């Protein structure tokens, strides 16, 4: 039973743990086990892990609960039919929870919260920290699946870019569903 | 569980929608969970900034 959860950067030495991760989607599982997840030209990958005590971490005795990968992006807007820069963005490129932890809740300071919501809140916190300390950015963007949509809307305060909005979509795979979503990085006014 | 689509999107968002974002207030539930995580954060852990005390249910 995990007593602590923590975020660690994905490292090569954790790849044996990654091979046990199963979110139910071969593409996402494959990504975590590929060199892309470790490639700083592509993204930075964070693992959410659970431990009973700190010795577990020292002894490499832990399980991956979920992971997410971040990269950079840009949000533009239309002005007199020209696409103009609106703000820098951080893209949640990957976000997945292992099937074992899907819909499971944990007690966090008296609140019962699902692992997915916990991981999302930590992910948003890390993004805000990156933006405050390292690179200035205004927005967070992602492409959700149908099953992930409610998590981002209800637990992440994201907006859906409606189909009738003027946005451009370039697809890699035609048969996948896709809900482009966005939000500001900061919940409150920073200034 | 897969939460992210395999598609890639270039975001072109109408200006009025971006302006609307500035006035958006997060829900009470969102803020409650955010606060709970803040409280559960374990300071001075040797494993970095993002360590949280939890109880499995």
Image: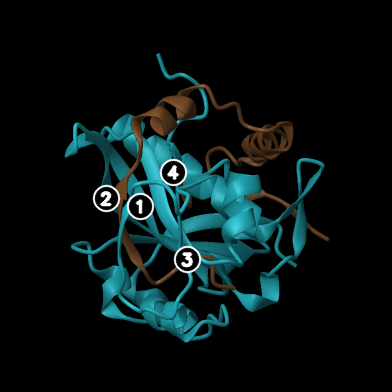
* Image x and y of residue A131, in percent: 33, 35
Residue B16 shown left or right of residue A117 in the figure = left
Which dot marks residue A126? Answer: 4
Drawn side of residue A51 relative to residue A12, left or right: right
How far is disc 3 from disc 2 in space, using C-alphas?
Answer: 16 Å
Q: Which mark is residue B4?
A: 3
Give SS at disc 3: loop
Colour of the chain lettered A: cyan
Chain under label 4? A
Dot 4 falls on a residue whose secondary structure is: helix
Task: Give whichever of discs 4 and 2 has the lower sequence position.
Answer: 2
Residue designated by label 1: A91
Which numbered marker is on residue A72?
Answer: 2
Q: Nearer the viewer, mark 3 or mark 2?
A: 3
Residue at the (61%, 40%) spot, across then down: B41
Task: Where is residue A101? Give x, y as percent.
Answer: 68, 70
Location of residue A116 by image quarter: bottom right
Q: Is residue B43 above or below residue B2?
A: above
Distance in Å between CA atoms under marks 3 and 1: 11 Å
Q: Secondary structure at mark 1?
A: strand
Q: Earlier in the sequence, mark 1 or mark 2?
A: 2
Instruction: Tell me the brown chain.
Output: B
Q: Are marks 1 and 2 in contact (CB under 8 Å)?
A: yes
Residue A70 position, x and y percent, is: 35, 55
User: Residue at position x 32%, y 81% from top?
Assistant: A34
């Amino acid at each position: 039973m995990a007593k602590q959860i923590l975020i660690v950067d994905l490292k090569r030495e954790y790849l044996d743990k990654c091979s046990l991760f199963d979110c139910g989607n071969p593409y996402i599982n494959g990504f975590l086990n590929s060199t892309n997840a470790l490639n700083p030209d592509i993204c930075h990958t964070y693992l959410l892990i659970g431990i009973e005590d700190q010795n577990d971490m020292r002894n490499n005795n832990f399980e991956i609960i979920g992971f997410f990968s971040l990269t950079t992006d840009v949000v533009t807007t239309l002005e007199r039919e020209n696409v103009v820069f609106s703000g820098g963005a951080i893209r949640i490129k990957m976000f997945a929870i292992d099937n074992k932890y899907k819909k499971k809740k944990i007690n966090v300071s008296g609140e019962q919260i699902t692992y997915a919501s916990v991981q999302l809140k930590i992910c948003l916190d890390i993004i805000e920290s990156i933006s405050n300390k390292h690179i200035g950015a205004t927005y967070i963007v992602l492409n959700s699946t149908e099953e992930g949509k409610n998590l981002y809307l209800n637990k992440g305060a994201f907006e859906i870019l409606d189909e009738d909005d003027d946005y451009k979509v370039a697809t890699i795979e035609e048969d996948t569903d896709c809900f482009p979503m966005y939000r500001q990085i900061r919940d409150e006014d920073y200034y | 569980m897969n939460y992210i689509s395999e598609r890639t999107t270039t975001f072109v968002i109408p200006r009025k929608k971006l302006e609307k974002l500035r006035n958006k207030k997060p829900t009470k539930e969102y803020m409650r969970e955010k606060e709970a995580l803040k409280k559960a954060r374990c300071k001075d852990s040797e494993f970095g900034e993002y360590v949280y005390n939890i109880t499995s249910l």
